[in-house]
Image (tube, rainbow, N blue to C red):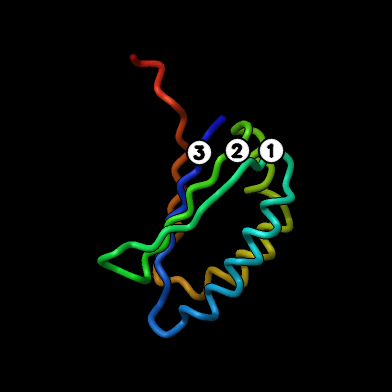
């Protein structure tokens, strides 16, 4: 299993429009092969900074969803509402004790 941290920063005044579209992205991801679970968190010091932590079966499953036409189409609606580029970090458990 891998975890994917997606960080986005919403432009001022676009919070509710962003929330509606971000829900659509998550609804589509849930049905993607390999998706396990996910949660979205809000930065306590900056309510426009959102982080989604998603669990995927494998990096290949994540890559397939990330490059999918469905995600690209949804992101085309979401991206103009952000004032920074989306930051994505793919994480795995360390083998260290």
Q: Would you say 90 lies left or right of 28 here?
A: left
| Label 3, residues with CA under 10 Å away: few <14, some 14-19, many ≥20 | many
Image quadrant assignment for residue 85: bottom left
Answer with mark 1 or mark 3, whichever residue precedes in sequence.
3
Q: Position of residue 28 (x, y in %)?
A: 70, 57
Q: Marks 2 and 3: in contact by CB < 8 Å?
A: yes
| Label 1, residues with CA under 10 Å away: few <14, some 14-19, many ≥20 | some
Q: Is residue 87 above or below residue 84?
A: above
Answer with mark 3 or mark 2, whichever residue precedes in sequence.
3
Name the residue carrying label 3: 3
Which image quarter holds the C terminus? top left
Q: Position of residue 21 (x, y in %)?
A: 61, 71
Which image quarter holds the N terminus? top right
- Whole-angstrom CA distance, mark 3 to mark 2, is 6 Å
Q: Residue sitting at 43 percent across and 53 percent down?
A: 87
Q: Is residue 72 above or below residue 32?
A: below
Name the residue carrying label 2: 56
Q: Looking at the image, which residue sits at the far bottom?
A: 13
Q: Nearer the viewer, residue 15 or 44?
A: 44
Q: Position of residue 49 (x, y in %)?
A: 37, 65
Name the residue carrying label 1: 34
- Whole-angstrom CA distance, mark 1 to mark 3, is 12 Å
Name the element at disc 1.
Answer: loop
Q: Position of residue 86 (x, y in %)?
A: 46, 58
């Amino acid at each position: 299993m891998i975890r994917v941290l997606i960080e986005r920063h919403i432009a001022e005044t676009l919070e509710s429009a962003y929330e509606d579209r971000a829900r659509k992205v998550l609804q589509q991801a849930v049905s993607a092969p390999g998706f396990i679970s996910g949660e979205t968190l809000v930065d306590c010091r900056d309510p426009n900074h959102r982080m989604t932590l998603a669990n995927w079966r494998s990096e290949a499953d994540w890559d397939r969803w990330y490059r999918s036409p469905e995600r690209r189409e949804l992101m085309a609606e979401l991206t103009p509402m952000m004032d920074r580029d989306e930051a994505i970090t793919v994480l795995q458990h360390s083998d260290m004790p």
